[in-house]
Image (cartoon, rainbow, N blue to C red):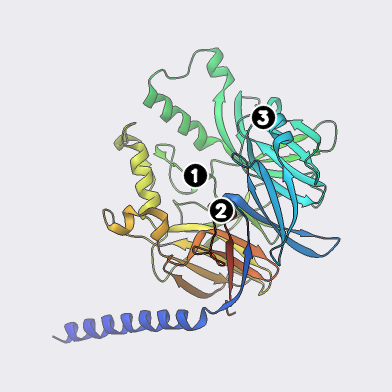
Amino acid sequence: MLKNIIFIIFILSFWGCRSTENEQNKKQLQIKKEYHFQSGVNGSRYHKKIFYDTKSQKEYVYFFDFVTDKAVKIFDMQGKVVQEISLVPTLKVLQKIRDIQIISWDTIILNSQETNKIAFINREGKVWKDVSLDTLLTDKKGNHFELWNFEVLNATGETLIFPCGWRYNTQDIAQNKEPKDNFDHTRYFYKNEFFSPYFCKVSNLYGKKPTIEYGLYSFYGNMGNKDNLFLELPSYAYVHKKLFVYSIYSDTLYQINPENLQIQNKIKITSSYSTLRANPLDNDNTTLSNMQELSNQIGRTEGYIYDMEYDEKNKQYCVIVFHKIPLSTPQEKQGYEKRPFSVIIYDNSFKKLHEYLFDNKTHNAYSVLSSQAGIMFHRKKSTPKRKSNKNDFTTFTIFDFEK
């Protein structure tokens, strides 16, 4: 009887604390400011960024569309378009664009999909330099890699860091060692990916001969072994001049030394609302027919670290985590649009300060910008009201995250 009473008291205390925490979230999460941009493009994660112009000491938000409009729109923080850049000349060089970073008005860097090329353009869209790295991205053992989205490691844009994906081995092709069966080839692919480097650092881009440095080999060995399948895109952040890697299969932030590309620190992330780790797929229980669906289920239902930003205004880290939800529920079937998430605030020593709960009804976890004024969250219902799809307003909200 006594045990039952103690258990009931514990449950009531637990939910009382959770209720108090939720009430505190509602009280503390006040809107500080909102910004409106008539972007005309989707406000998703891969269609907008922010850059700081050191000469004028002003920030600008830029939206880009590589497929339809083939253009970049740059806005000041008052929502006025200050520059539009056509990407048509760049597409003639790169064929397909993967990523873009604005370093300054006349140093805009873009990289290609599949072909490992980099182009430098100015504010008029003129390509003033292009570099092909494809021949440099085959190592001594014949492994060939493809570059993904990049970050800039210095002010001039001469050194970039990319996650890189294993694509093929020239020696295996020459010796006809690649598996013929589709599923055997898939296992062969992911086994090679498991042992491959996570990062590729490209330096001396303005010189005659760029240099390539690989690092963080067998990263997924921190979470499993070569018999597991780790199906996800690279997840990393270069914030506050520090490099971090995270994964759906881990509850840990891995801080990477940008000089030698090795792990220098591990930070465990905890949420009051969810576990934060998915199990990788097992090779023995995975088939070619169920692999994609099992991977999608993990993304739709498991709790995990999704994003990371640095709040320059309050000098603190913001870690965004999705919460775990049950399979085969209306919430799960609606995918990311209805996933609850929270923002966990850490100080510069990674001491946890607060966790703010979001229901994902008003703001997106997957569309966040880090500005001098604070962390900007994409609001789902933009204001002013949209007149047409072509004239979409994208609204960002800055919340008053208390220290």
Q: How far apart are marks 2 and 3 (CA)?
A: 28 Å
**Secondary structure category for the residue under label 1:** helix
Q: Which residue was labeled with disc 3?
A: 137
Q: Where is residue 53 in the image (x, y as percent from the top left)?
A: 80, 59
**Secondary structure category for the residue under label 2:** helix
Split into 4 quadrants, where in the image is the C terminus? bottom right
Amino acid on which the number 2 mark rests in the picture? Arg
**Secondary structure category for the residue under label 3:** loop
Q: Where is residue 371 in the image (x, y as percent from the top left)?
A: 68, 65
Split into 4 quadrants, where in the image is the N terminus? bottom left
Could you tell which of marks 2 and 3 lies nearer the N-terminus? Answer: 2
Marks 2 and 3 close (CB-CB < 8 Å): no
Could you tell which of marks 1 and 3 lies nearer the N-terminus? Answer: 3
Q: Can residue 113 be seen in this view?
A: yes
Residue at image x 59%, y 40%?
Answer: 68
Residue at image x 48%, y 84%?
Answer: 27
User: Between 256 and 326, which is closer to the camera in this rendering?
Assistant: 326
Q: Where is residue 189 in the image (x, y as percent from the top left)?
A: 47, 29
Tell me if 302 is positioned left or right of 171 in this view: left
Q: How far apart are marks 1 and 3 (CA)?
A: 21 Å
Q: Give the crowd class for mark 1: few <14, some 14-19, many >=20 residues within 10 Å.
A: many
Q: Where is residue 151 in the image (x, y as percent from the top left)?
A: 68, 48
Look at discs 1 and 3 and give the one toward the viewer: 3
Marks 1 and 3 close (CB-CB < 8 Å): no
Q: Which residue was labeled with disc 1?
A: 220
In the picture, the disc for residue 33 is: none
User: Between 395 and 129, which is closer to the camera in this rendering?
Assistant: 395
Q: Give the crowd class for mark 2: few <14, some 14-19, many >=20 residues within 10 Å.
A: some
Look at discs 2 and 3 and give the one toward the viewer: 2
Q: Which residue was labeled with disc 2?
A: 45
Q: How far apart are marks 2 and 1 (CA)?
A: 25 Å
Amino acid on which the number 3 mark rests in the picture? Leu
